[in-house]
Image: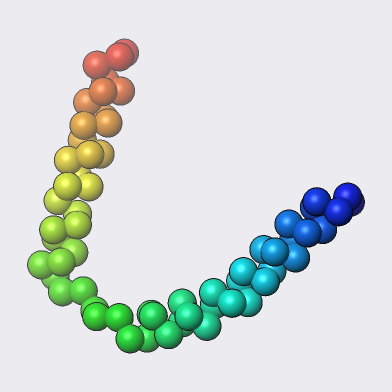
Amino acid sequence: MNWLQIGSALFGIAMLVFIFPRMRYAMKHSPKGTMKDWLSYLFPLGFIVLFVVFLIMSVR
């Protein structure tokens, strides 16, 4: 291992140490999604999936 890989590994570990408590706090205090929120997320996602399937089928 060279010094760049060691430094990158230490930076990644330090990032996890500092980010994990903030992420846990944000997850605990965030608003919960309702069914309407989930449907408004899944509706465009379904269109994207269908569009990608359409593109794949049109290439064949």
Q: Which image quarter: residue 48?
A: top left
Question: Looking at the rendering, in which quadrant would you find the C terminus?
Answer: top left
Whether residue 13 is situated above or below residue 45 in the rendered picture: below
Is residue 18 shown left or right of residue 44? right
Residue appearing at x 43%, y 85% in the figure: 25
Outermost residue to the left: 36
Is residue 33 shown left or right of residue 1? left
Residue appearing at x 19%, y 57% in the figure: 41
Question: Looking at the picture, how far across and down is residue 44, in whole percent?
Answer: 17, 47
Residue appearing at x 30%, y 14% in the figure: 59
Question: Looking at the picture, how far across and down is residue 7, in whole percent?
Answer: 78, 59
Outermost residue to the top: 60
Whether residue 59 is situated above or below residue 10 in the rendered picture: above
Question: Looking at the picture, how far across and down is residue 2, in whole percent?
Answer: 88, 50
Residue appearing at x 15%, y 74% in the figure: 34
Color style of the picture: rainbow
Q: Which image quarter: residue 49?
A: top left
Q: Which image quarter: residue 26?
A: bottom left
Is residue 41 shown left or right of residue 18? left
Nearest the viewer among 60 and 46 is: 46
Nearest the viewer among 40 and 53 is: 40
| Number of numbered labels in the structure image | 0
Whether residue 47 is situated above or below residue 41 in the rendered picture: above
Nearest the viewer among 52 and 11 is: 11
